[in-house]
Amino acid sequence: MAPRPGVEITCAMTTLRSLEALAGLSAGTSASDTPEARRARLDNAQATIASAVAADIGEVAGTNPTLARSATHSDDSAFRDGASAYVFGFRFADEPSFALTATCLVDQRAVMLRPVGTPASPQLAAFLRRVEAASMAGESSLEQVDATPHVPLPEVARRFRYRKLAVAALVILAAAIGYWQYQSRQRSPFKFGELRAGMPFSDIQDAQDRGEPLHIGCTPVSSDFRICDAEANGPYGHITTAVRDGHVIAVQMLLYDSTPDVRTLAYRTTNEWDDVVNGYNNHTAGARDTIRYRTHNDRWSAEMLMRDTAFTPMLVTLRDEKKVAQVARRRVASLLVLARHGLADPADLAETERHTPGTLLAGADTLSYEGRRLALASSALPRCAPEPVLFMEVGETVRRELRPEEQLLLERSIPLVYPGHRLFLGTMAYLVDSAGAGEEIHISPITRLTGTDAFAYAISFKGRAAAVGQRARRAHGFGLCRAPAEIVLAHFDSAASAVTHVEHATLEHESLASDVTHISYVAEDDPDSPLRIWYSALYGNEDWYGDVSWISNMRPQDLRVLNQVPLALKKVNRGMNHLPGAIVGDPREVEARLVFMDELGSGVSMAGRRARAINSTPRGTRYGFIVMPSLVNGLPSGWTLLAMF
């Protein structure tokens, strides 16, 4: 595509208000300025610069333009010598067939003007003729601006009188080529279809406006940063985009199929990337069959995960490394959001933590702040009342699953745990009170503590948990009470004929309901070996609900939980059309499976630690990272994990 015409205002305007304004702004800068101070100065001067540029344009156009959009770029290496810049968009009320984009480089005090419109537009042609006439006029001048800071705009050094139209045309052409090169530096050389890092997000939105099969939803993360997701049908897949200041800083596309056409597209794309820079294979855990590319100046990167399987046949990620780094420096919580969506490189997290230890934990705490409040409120809720069944189903289903000694253990220990109650084993297991009312319970597999006379099992209250779950899905009366599972430790006498005493404890004090699926104990000559407990827990409020699957280690001597590790998270937002991280299926639902538990270590505290995660649904999988927030009540909290997810 041919470059659009561009005009240096320095060659076209007579009053040069815009250059004077830029010179004054540059004179007020200092090398010792902090990025925040520089950004504030640019923001404060934006309206003044826009007014000056509009006045210069109005003098040549014969009518004053209206500012339609504006953006500020601070110390951007994409501009010449890392200049700061403004980008303004102008429109004319009486000339709707074209608009103008003005790019103002602060440090070099130059302004590039680009008309945007239909080439055959009479209004655009008339405007270009006026620009040409201004350049040819006897009083037209080229102002030479001193680049040294703190020096005011000098007097006109010399005057040019253009004698031939070819000279003016050559100047315009050179400016157009320069602008085209500048725009090229703003976009990644790595493309996948029409997607590339650095592209204006409006280009993706324009595709939606043209009726192409894109359905876009965006979620703000900070004042200038958002995550946008889109479902595409050509090729069929899911697009996740990180947008900052109106431009794409990272984009990832997950393709759901592995048809020959898609495979051909993958090979053609990597061949094109090889023309830019040679890629290298990455065979680290969790990222097999990945080819990575990075430009020599480390500005742009691309990677492709391609497998010969039904799941994740292709995952393409394109990033603007400089912009992603800026996001990380400004707000670490935003980096963690990128990491959760698979748009951040592991090196980003490692470098952030290396540069400022504790930064990742602070960012995770920011995201999970609301969860900590919910956790404390939930721990104060009373236990749910029993949910008796209408009738108990008589049968041998549960009894047949138990050995005779296990039946004896349960029948003799449960009345000690719950005085006035007894156990009834039928089609289900029931806890029966003195009035004969039965409540359905679930009893986990029983495990013996090797080398002792103790047996451990868990009781989950199915009826109570089901009632809490129904309220969760309906958002009605949710969180009025808790239905936690309990761990029971029963001791037999030496003859293994009677239970001498029992101990029991609630597994955790935060979730609204929990269910234990398995308990194991392996002493291995270590008397301090813990009970290892697998369980799932329910959390939520009026806005969302979700589950966390845990492995918990409990000390059998006093039934105290030592530590716990999340295995999987699942969250559903109510009343939302989109939830960040959703891939396919129900757009409100997102699931993360943490498969690299070894990265969390075995210590008591996991606060600030990060683990690779897999965000998955039946139709697609992508890798991301989760950073654990601070502990609540001495343990990782499902509330905080789901609040930040």
Image: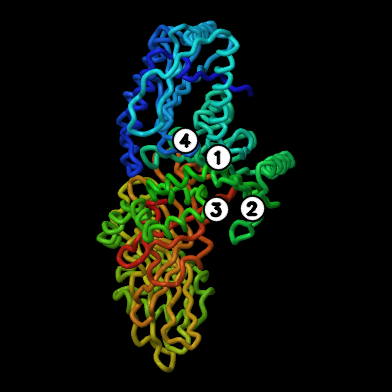
- Give coordinates of residue 608: x percent, y percent: 39, 61
Which of pointers 4 and 3 indicates the residue nearer the eye? 3
The crowd level at tag 2 (other Cα within 10 Å; few <14, some 14-19, many 20+) is many
Q: CA distance from mark 2 to mark 1?
A: 18 Å
Question: In the rendering, which numbered label is found on residue 354?
Answer: none
* N-terminal label among 4 and 3: 4
Amino acid at circle 2:
Thr
Viewer-proximal residue among 550 and 266: 266
Which of pointers 2 and 3 indicates the residue nearer the eye? 2
* N-terminal label among 3 and 1: 1
Residue 358 located left or right of residue 250: left
- The residue labelled by disc 4 is 217
Q: CA distance from mark 4 to mark 3?
A: 21 Å
Q: CA distance from mark 1 to mark 4?
A: 11 Å
- Mark 4 touches mark 3? (CB < 8 Å): no
Examine the rendered structure and indicate whether residue 192 appears above or below residue 462: above
Question: In the rendering, which numbered label is found on residue 239?
Answer: 1
Q: Secondary structure at mark 3?
A: strand
Examine the rendered structure and indicate whether residue 322 appears above or below residue 3: below
Residue appearing at x 61%, y 40% in the figure: 190
